[in-house]
Amino acid sequence: MSAEAAGTAPLGVAMIGYAFMGKAHSNAWRNVASYFDVPAFEQKVLVGRDAAAVSEAAGKYGWAESATNWRSVLDRDDIHIIDVCAPGWMHAEIAIAALDAGKHVLLEKPLANTLAEAEAMTSAARAARAKGVQSMVGFNYRRVPALALAKELITEGRLGTVRHVRAAYLQDWLADDQAPMTWRLRKDTAGSGALGDIASHAIDQVLFLLGDQVTEVSGRTHTFVNRRPGAEGLEDVTVDDAAWATLSLASGAIASVEASRVATGRKNSLQLEVYGDKGALRFDLENLNELAFLDATAPAREQGFRRIVVTEPGHPYLEAWWPQGHIIGWEHTFTHEVRDFLLAVDSGTAPSPSFEDGLAVQRILDAVEQSAASKSALVQLSPATEGA
């Protein structure tokens, strides 16, 4: 039944930010209702600082109008959802204001640039949830069908007791030392470099797949290129190019995490390996429709990783797309994300990952930075409070 037939107005959506993530999210909002049964909504307004540029983007991406003042959008009764695709340094201010205004919030990862901001945002989300206002962090790789299937296999016990996880997110867009400065290379705007940008995804996958909590962290970060060409000559890079961490989990499992934006030849490779006493899984985002599974309970002469092409209607999310065997792509993860968020808002249930989940990742990122700064120390995290 449509919203109009039910006598309710469609949900009004406003999105803040229209660059890389804004384009990806816009594609999802524009297409989600064509493939999934979701509550009625309207792409009301796109917000950005440059009036001409945001107006052009709004027309291109399917938004009814544009605006340059995000606070004015929060005052509108026809706006029910705020999708935050702005840079990390703006997350806390926008998200807290939106939640306080009674707007449901979908927020790109990582939750914030600092732990203090993340804690304040989570507190605001908890208070808003008590009033029926929902919030979610956009860790879109939870919506890769192959990784959702991996989660199902682990939860079903197909791997037995998980002992070891390897997670590596590798890119090479900064391998060239002449690659120009951007806001992502300044600590005051980005918070951190590869650590917050892509290691956050790898860490979230460890928590998501295992349903576990981190108790102890050791880490290291490194900047390989300290100065890059900017508008006024060479500028200092104030964030990391790469990060490494070892995570101890409450279950007894150990996870190694690596992230790099200078890994020559790796374009967008999120690699995950999960090893249990009864089986193992392998995944690489550069082949996102495939999952490798080894069943260690089979006779030894039959064992070996087998390739699962995750395109069957029975696989997560894929009943909505193409006939079996027809692959989907990176952009579909955002469509799945928007679908899940809309259904949660419509049903009044808390979506996942929550701001609490985002805070758990933020605490681990902060612990990696602490450990890296001390060059040797292990940083303890309490399982009792990590998700609080």
Image (tube, rainbow, N blue to C red):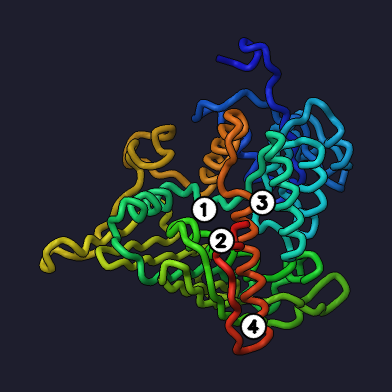
- Local secondary structure at mark 3: strand
- Local secondary structure at mark 1: helix
Q: CA distance from mark 1 to mark 2?
A: 7 Å
- Which numbered dot is residue 201? 2
The mark that comes first in sequence, 1 or 2, is: 1
Side of 274 relative to 78 (left or right):
left
Q: Which residue is tagged 1?
A: 141
Report if the CB atoms under discs 3 and 1 are less than 8 Å apart.
no
Q: Which residue is tagged 4?
A: 372
- Circle 4: residue type: Ala
Q: CA distance from mark 3 to mark 4?
A: 26 Å
Q: CA distance from mark 3 to mark 1?
A: 12 Å
Q: CA distance from mark 4 to mark 1?
A: 26 Å
Q: How far across and down, in percent of the image, does residue 201 sit?
A: 56, 61
The mark that comes first in sequence, 3 or 1, is: 3
Report if the CB atoms under discs 1 and 2 are less than 8 Å apart.
yes
